[in-house]
C-alpha cells in the first residue's frame, strides 16, 4: 500500500510550485485531480517542453471554467470530496473564483488548504508579482558566490519554485497529522520568499548568531570546479584535512603538505588565490579518466561535471531505479524520474502517465454525481 493512498487532492494551481507539491503527494499515493482551464489550452502545458509532463504524472485532469456559476458548483462538489486543496495564485484570486478558504471551509471543515504565493498572504509585498530570480534577489541568495574568484550567479534550476512546493508538501503532511489527532482542518500559507530566506539562513550564521557581517566562509579553492587536460570539468570537495592529504598524495605533490601557506585549513583560505592557481595547474596535467582512477584509489571527494544526458545515464542513477520509462497517451514512450527516496517497506510510485488536457473530465464529473445528460449539457455550454 502506498503511504498516502486514500487521500484526495484538488489542485487548482498552474506552472511549477503547486503542481510540484501535488506531484510529491501523488507519488506517495494520493489521488490528485488537477483542475485546468476549459476552452483554451492552458499556458502551463507549453511553457517548457517536458516540464509539464514531469510534474503532473500520477494525476487526473479536469478541464473547468471557474468563471461560470456551473463551474464554481463543480469545484465546490470536488472540494467537498477532497482532503487537500492546493492553489498558487496571488492573494485574492482564489476568492474571486469562489474557492477561497473562507468560502470553502463551511462545506468541508476538515479540509487542509494550502496557498503558495510569491510573498505570502500578509505583508507589504503580498500583491507584488515575481519570479524565481526576484525571490532569490530579495532573499540575499544572489549575493552569495558559489566559487572563489567568481561573481554570484543565478542557479540553472528553478530552486524557489521547487523549494516552496516541497515546503508545501511538508506542511500538508504536518497538517494531516494534526487532523488525525484533533479532527480539524488547516490553512497553510507558503511564501516563496520565506522559503528562500529559510534556505539563505544557513549562510547567515555569523550575522544571525553573532551579529557580525557575514563573509564567504563557505568558499574554498579546494571546493571548486577545475578543467582537466582533455578539456573536461571535474568538481573537487576537499574540505577535511585527511582529504587534503589524500589529494596531495594522489597528485604526487607531497611537497605541498610542508608548504607553510597551506599547512592548515585557515592558511589555505588565507592564501586561497595562490592555492587556486596551484590546484588549477595540477588538475590540468591529467585527463578526467586518469583523475577518476587515482581519486577513487585515494578516496578523495570528486565528480565529473555531467551534462543532463550523462546524469540520467549514470550507472549509479540507473541502479537506484530513478529513471523509469512509461507509455503516455499521445507521446509514446517517455522517461520520468521516480520519487527520489527509498523506503524499507513502502514506495513512491509512478502509477499514471501525465494526463492529456481534460482527459478525465467525464469520469470525474460522473464520480461527483453528474448524469450523462448533465455532463453533455455542461460540455455544450463550455463549462467543461
Image (spheres, rainbow, N blue to C red):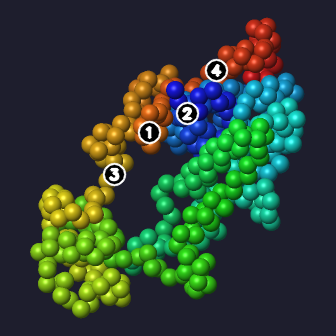
Could you say where residue 20 lies in the image, as x and y percent from the top left? 58, 43
Name the residue tied to disc 3. 307
Q: Which residue does the image show at 50% across and 82% down from the upper left?
A: 215
Nearest to N terminus: mark 1 or mark 4: 1
Q: Is residue 125 left or right of residue 102?
A: left
Name the residue tied to disc 1. 343
Q: Nearer the viewer, residue 288 or 172?
A: 172
Is residue 236 at all visible to an observer of this figure? yes
Q: Nearer the viewer, residue 308 or 101?
A: 101
Could you say where residue 87 lies in the image, as x and y percent from the top left? 72, 42
Badge 3: few (under 14), some or many (20 or more) residues near its Cα, within 10 Å? Answer: few
Q: Which residue does the image show at 33% across and 47% down from the upper left?
A: 311
Q: Which residue does the image show at 44% across and 70% down from the upper left?
A: 146
Q: Quadrant of residue 160?
A: bottom right
- Identify the image quadrant of the C terminus: top right
Q: Which mark is residue 3?
A: 2
Q: CA distance from mark 4 to mark 3?
A: 37 Å
Foreground disc of the pair 1, 4 = 1
- Where disc 2 sits, the SS reads loop
Q: Quadrant of residue 294?
A: bottom left
Nearest to N terminus: mark 1 or mark 3: 3
Residue placed farthest to the bottom in the image?
260
Q: Nearer the viewer, residue 28 or 99?
A: 28
Could you say where residue 290 lies in the image, as x and y percent from the top left? 14, 61
Q: CA distance from mark 3 to mark 2?
A: 34 Å
Foreground disc of the pair 3, 2 = 2
Q: CA distance from mark 2 to mark 1?
A: 10 Å
Name the residue tied to disc 4. 360
Amino acid at each position: 500500500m502506498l503511504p498516502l493512498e486514500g487521500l484526495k487532492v484538488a489542485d487548482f494551481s498552474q506552472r511549477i510550485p503547486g503542481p510540484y507539491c501535488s506531484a510529491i503527494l501523488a507519488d506517495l499515493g494520493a489521488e490528485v485531480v488537477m483542475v485546468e482551464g476549459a476552452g483554451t489550452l492552458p499556458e502551463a502545458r507549453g511553457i517548457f517542453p517536458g516540464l509539464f509532463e514531469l510534474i503532473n504524472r500520477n494525476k487526473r485532469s479536469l478541464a473547468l471554467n471557474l468563471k461560470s456559476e456551473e463551474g464554481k458548483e463543480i469545484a465546490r462538489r470536488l472540494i467537498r470530496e477532497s482532503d487537500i486543496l492546493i492553489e498558487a495564485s496571488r492573494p485574492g484570486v482564489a476568492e474571486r473564483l469562489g474557492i477561497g478558504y473562507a468560502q470553502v471551509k463551511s462545506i468541508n471543515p476538515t479540509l487542509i488548504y494550502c496557498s503558495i504565493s510569491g510573498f505570502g498572504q500578509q505583508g507589504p509585498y503580498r500583491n507584488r508579482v515575481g519570479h524565481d530570480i526576484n525571490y532569490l534577489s530579495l532573499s540575499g541568495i544572489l549575493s552569495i558566490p558559489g566559487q572563489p574568484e567568481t561573481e554570484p550567479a543565478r542557479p540553472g534550476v528553478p530552486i524557489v519554485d521547487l523549494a516552496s512546493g516541497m515546503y508545501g508538501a511538508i506542511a500538508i503532511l504536518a497538517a494531516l497529522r494534526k487532523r488525525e489527532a484533533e479532527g480539524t482542518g488547516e490553512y497553510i500559507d507558503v511564501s516563496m520568499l520565506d522559503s528562500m530566506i529559510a534556505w539563505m539562513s544557513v549562510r547567515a550564521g555569523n550575522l544571525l548568531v553573532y551579529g557580525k557581517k557575514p563573509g564567504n566562509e563557505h568558499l574554498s579553492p579546494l571546493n571548486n570546479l577545475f578543467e582537466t587536460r582533455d578539456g573536461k570539468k571535474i568538481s573537487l570537495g576537499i574540505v577535511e584535512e585527511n582529504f587534503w592529504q589524500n589529494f596531495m598524495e594522489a597528485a604526487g605533490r607531497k611537497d605541498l603538505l610542508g608548504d607553510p601557506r597551506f599547512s592548515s585549513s585557515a592558511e589555505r583560505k588565507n592564501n586561497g588565490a595562490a592555492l587556486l592557481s596551484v590546484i588549477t595547474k595540477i588538475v590540468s596535467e591529467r585527463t578526467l579518466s586518469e583523475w577518476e582512477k587515482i581519486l577513487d584509489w585515494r578516496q578523495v571527494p570528486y565528480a565529473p561535471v555531467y551534462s543532463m544526458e550523462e546524469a540520467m545515464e549514470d550507472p549509479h542513477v540507473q541502479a537506484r531505479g530513478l529513471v523509469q520509462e512509461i507509455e503516455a497517451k499521445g507521446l509514446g514512450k517517455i522517461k520520468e524520474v521516480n520519487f527520489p527516496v527509498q523506503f524499507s517497506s513502502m514506495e513512491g510510485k509512478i502509477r499514471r502517465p501525465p494526463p492529456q488536457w481534460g482527459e478525465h473530465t467525464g469520469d470525474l464529473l460522473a464520480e461527483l454525481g453528474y448524469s450523462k445528460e448533465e455532463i453533455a449539457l455542461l460540455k455544450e455550454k463550455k463549462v467543461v
